[in-house]
Image (cartoon, rainbow, N blue to C red):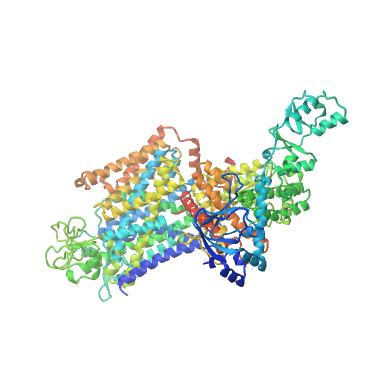
Amino acid sequence: MIEQELHQHPFSLLDETARSRLRDGVDLAYFEAGDIILDASSASEYVYVVHKGSVAELDVQAPDGREQVGVYAAGDVFGAISVLNGKSRYRFRAEQQSLCYLIPAALFLTLCEDNADFGRHFQQRLVEKGQRLAERREGGVTMAGFMLARVDACMREPLIMATTATLHDAVVALKQHGVDSVLIEHQAQYAIITKTDLLTALVLQHHDASTALSVVAETRLITVSPSDYLFSALTRMTRHKVARVVVMEERKAVGVVELTDVLSFFSSRSYVVGLEIEKADSLDALQLASARLPELVDALMAQGVKMRFAMELLAALNGRVMGKAWEMVMPADQLQGCLIVMGSEGRGEQILKTDQDNGLILGDHQAWPGLPRDAERFTQALLSMGYPPCPGKVMVNNPDWQGPVQQWQERVYHWAGEAAGKGVLNLTILADAHCVAGDRRLLEAVRETLFDRCSGDDLLMAHFARPVLQFATPLNLFGSLKKPQHGIDIKKGALFPLVHGVRAMALQHRIAETSTLRRLKKLVAAGAMEASFAEDLGEAMELFSELRLNQQLAQWHGQQTELQDNHIVVQSLSSLERDLLRDALHLVGDFKQRLSRRFHLEY
Amino acid sequence: MDIQTLTYLFVGGSFALYIGIAIWSRAGSTKDFYVAGGGVSPVANGAATAADWMSAASFISMAGIIAYAGYDASVYLMGWTGGYVLLAMLLAPYLRKFGKFTVPDFIGDRYYSNVARTVAVICVIFVSFTYVAGQMRGTGIVFARFLEVDVNVGVVIGMAIVFFYAVLGGMKGITYTQVAQYCVLIFAFLVPAVFLSIMMTGHVFPQTGFGATVLDAAGNDSGVYLLQKLDQVVTDLGFTQYTEGSKSTIDVFFIAAALMCGTAGLPHVIVRFFTVPRVKDARISAGWALFFIALLYTSAPAVGAFARLNLIDTVNETQYTELPDWFYNWENSGLIGWVDKNGDGAVQMRAGAPFDGKPNFAGSRDEAKGNQGERVVTNAPTDNASEVYIDRDIIVLANPEIGNLPAWVIALVAAGGVAAALSTAAGLLLVISSAISHDLLKKTIKPDITEKQELLAARGAAVVAICIAGYFGINPPGFVAQVVAFAFGLAAASFFPVILMGIFYKRMNKEGAIAGMLVGLTFTFCYIVYFKFVSPDLNTAEHWWLGVSPEGIGTLGMVLNFAVAFAVSRVTAPPPEHIQHIVEDIRIPRGAGEAHAH
C-alpha cells in the first residue's frame, strides 16, 4: 500500500534500494479522532506519513483560536523535523480517524544520510519552518508585509503647535507626548523642530527658552503621502539624510514617520532590492537591481508569502523599474505623456519577468519629433534589463502602440469595428492597460472611450469573451483530474479562462481596475457576481499562479527542463494539492458555463 | 445487412461524428489564445446556418405537404425562403450594428421600454414553442420508425436526446458540428431524390427531373410529362388536379407575406448571423447559406411529386396482404391506418379522409387484428370510398422504401431526419430558455436575480419547454397547421413592423411601437380565433374579410400595425435625443472618424 506514497515527492528522491529498505521498515498505525500522535516537546521516534484521514499541527503555547499551525492530509509527511531537531515543537493530533505509516527515526536518519537529495529536502523544510516561526514571533510582519506596507500603517499622529509657542513649550510637549519632533503651522505652511534642533538652538546657538519656535524651525520639509510604500519613505530618508518624514495629504500634515519605526519593520534583508531600485541613478544600477528580482521572488515563495501579496509587490517593483528607466531614457521635457504597460504586467500578475507589453499615450498637443529614436532607446533599455521583446510587437517603439489620445480613441473604434482576430486581441491587450509613469489622466480618457464603445455592444462582447471556451478544462468525464504524462497546461486550461472571463466582465461593467483580484471585488460591488463565488475564483487564481510559479522557479533553478512551459504534472503534486487543484478546476468549469450564458456563447 | 442494422449504424455513426467533432474542437490545446471566430470560413458558416434553418419541418414535412397539397403548398416554399432572404438582407445587418443579440433586447433598448420588451419576449417564446413542438413530432416519427417503437415513445426518446444535446452537451456552439449535421441532412435528402429522379425520368437532378417526361417500365421515354401524369392519376382517383391551386391569388400573397415576415424574426437564425465577426464574412456566409438551403428547397417539389406517384402506384388497388413491408412497419408505428370499407381486401386511395381525425387503434400492435391482419381502427369511418390514412410526415422517410431504393439509402434518410430535428430543436430550446431567464426574468421581472439563479431558471425553462413541446408532439392538436399559422401571423403582426421602423425610422417612439404591436396583435388574434375556434363553419372564402384566410391575416395585421404606430408616433413626443442618434448611427458604418463625437 505504501507504493503509492513511495512514488510521490519526497520519497521519489530515494533510489530503489532505499525504497525497498523503507518498504521493509515501515509500520502502519491507526489513530482515533482526537488521539495525540506526537506531543509538543517530546522526542519523536517516528516520521509519519498520512495514508488516510487528516492530522492537525497545533501550537500549544499560542492563544486560543490561533493554535492551528497546519493540517496534514493523505500523502503528507510530518514529524521529520521533530526527528531532525530532537524533539517536537508542536502537538500533532488526529482530526479524524487516520491511518499513518510510521518510519522509525533511525531508519529515516540513515535514509537522509545515504540519499543526499532526500536529506536536503528535509533540511530545507527545517530552515523554512524556522523562518516562518521567526515571523510568527515578530507579530506576523513578513517581508512581503513590509514591502507592501503603506506609509499610513507606520505613521504617528503629528504633534502640531501654534506658531507663537516657545522652545520651552516644545520641550514640555515633547516630553509629555513621548515623541521626537513637533510641527508648527503657519499660513498653511508647515515647519518641523526635532529634538536635535532644540538642543542645537538652546545649547549651541544660545537661544532663550522663550524664543518662538518659528525662529529655529526647518521649513524645507521632506514629505510623503499616506498611500506611498513604506520603503519609498525609507528611501527618501536615506537620500536626504534625515530621520523622519512628514506625511502630507491634500496640503495638510496628517502624520510623521520616524526612521526607528520603519527599522522595526525589518525582518529580512531582501527588502534591499526595493531600496536598490529606488536608489538607482543610472541604467546600469537599475539593471543590477532588477536582475535581483527573481531572487526576491524565490525568497518570498520559500517564506510562504501569500501569492496575492507577492504579485502585488512584484508588480509595484516592476512598475518602478520601468518608471525609472522611463525617466532616465526620455528627454526631460517630454515626460508628460503616459507610459502604459499591458497584458500580465498591466494586471500586476506577472511574477517573473515576461515579455514587455507597453505603449505610449501622448498629450493632445505634445510635439515630439525625436519620438521614434527615443522610443527605440527605451525599448532597448528594457531589453537590457531582461524584459524580453513582445512577439506581437506591442511595444513603445512600434508606431501602432504610440500616439496622442485621439489617435488611441480612433484605434479603439477601428479594432471594435473589426470584431475579429486581431482587433479583439488588441482590445484585450488594451483592456489591461495600467499607467506606470507620466500623466494617468491620458489613459483614463482612452479607457473611457474603450468602455463607451464596448460595454453596451453585446455582439462585440460575445466575440471578446469567446476565447474563454477555446481550451478544454483538464478534467475528465467523471470530474477528476486528467493525468497525461507530459502534464496539464495550467495556463490554457485554468488561468487563461479565469483571467479572460473576469476581464470581459470587467469591460462589460466599466471597471477600470486591471488586476483580476481587484476586478473580482469590483464585480461583487457592482452586483455582477456573488461575493462567495468571487472569493472562490480569487483563491483558485492564486492556486494556479502558485503552481505555475513553482514550475517556473524550478526552471529558473535549472530543474525539470523536459517539461513544456506552464505544464504541471499532476502525479508530482501532493494529494492535498491535487484536491485543491481539482476543486479549483471545477470552479473554472462553472465559471466558463456562466460566461457562455452571459455572453451568449452557446449558440 | 438488413435495413434495421444499417439504420442503427447510420444514426449511431452520425451521432459519433457530432460528438467526436465536439470533443476534438474543444480538447485541442495546440491552438492560439485568440482566434475569436475568425477561424471559421464563410462556407462552413453558411452550412451551419443552413442546418439551423432547415428543421424537421423542412426535411420531413415540407415534401409531404407538397405531395398531398400540390400547388397550394408552394406558398410554404416561397414564404420560408423569402423569410430567409428578408432576414439576411433587411434585418440582420442592422441588428448586428445595434449590438443586441435577441429581438426582445433590441426592442427593449430601441424603445426604452420594458413593456415593449415583454411583448416581444412573449411573441418570441410563442413562435419558438410552436416551432419546437413541430420538431419534436418530427423527431418522434424518426425514432419511432427506426427503433420500431410507437410514435409516442419515439417522441419521449427524442425529447431526452434533444435535451441532452442542447442543454447539457454544450455542442451547439461548435460550428463544425453544425456543418457535419448539414452534410448528413443534405445527403440524406438528395441521395434518394437523385435515385428516384433517375429511375423515373432519367434526369440526374431532381430539379430538372421535376419538369421532364416520365420513363415507362422498360426505361423508354413515354413522352408524358411528370406533372401531366400526376394530374391524370390524381384526378382519376377523385382528387383535385395536382397543379391546380384552390387558394385565391390575394390569399396566396397574404399567406406568403405572413410566413415571410413571421419567419424573418425567428430568433435562432438571427443569432447565427451574429456569430460571424466581420460584416463582410457575414454577407458571404448568408449567400452560401441561401445556396445550401436552396439545394433542399428546390428538390422538395420533385420529391413530393415522385413520392405521390410512387405511392399511388404501389398502394392503390393492391391487396393488403401483398403490400410491401414498409406499409406494415408504418402501420405499427401508428402513422398509417386502413379500413376495408368495401370488404374487397384491397386498399383504395380516394379523395377525402377515410375516417375522422388521426387513427386510434384498438389494442397494441400485435393484438386486435382485422380480417386481413391489419390493425383495427376505431375511428368512425366516413361515407366516401377513401380507405387509407397515410400521415404526411412519413412521406420523405418512407420515400426510399416506396421507391425500392437500396437499404443504405433508407438508413441514411433516418440519420438525416435526426440531424435536421436535432440542430433546430436545440437552437430553439436555447432561445426559449434564454428568453425566459435573461430577457424576461433578469431584464424585466426580477433584476436582482443572481447569476446562479439565472442559470437555474434557464435550465428549468429548457426542461419545461421540452416537456410542453413533447406533450404537443405526442398529442398534436388536430390543428398543428392552424397553430403554426397562428404563431407566424402573430409574429408578423406584432414585432416585424416594430423592428423595421426601429431601424429605418428614427422618429418612431415607444408609444407608437407599443400601440402598433397591441393593435396588430389583437386584430390578428381575434380574427384567427373567430374563424378557427369560435365559428369554424364560417371559415370559407366568402366569409373572409377581403378574401384573406386566417393563415394570411397576419399580413393585414402587420399593415394595421404600421399605420397605427406611425399615426401615434406623430402625435406623441419624439424619442429621446440619444435614441435618435443611435438610429442614425445604425445605418452608418462604424468607423474611425466617429471617435471625434465621443
**Displayed quadrant of residue A521:** top right
Q: Is residue B287 above or below residue B557?
A: below
Residue B402: x percent and y percent? 26, 69
Image side of residue B228 versus residue B492, left or right? left
Q: Is residue B598 above or below residue B129?
A: above
Residue extending farthest to the front is A42
Query: In front here: A86 or A415?
Result: A86
Rendered-image quadrant of the N terminus of chain B? bottom left
Is residue A77 visible to the viewer in this orientation of the structure?
A: yes
Q: Position of residue B176 (x, y in %)?
A: 45, 62
- Pick the residue in front: A252 or B528: A252
**Position above or below: A24 against A250:** below
From the viewer's perspective, is A317 left or right of B235? right
Q: Position of residue B122 (x, y in %)?
A: 36, 44
B24 relative to B363 in the view: left or right = right
Q: Quadrant of the C terminus of chain B?
A: top right
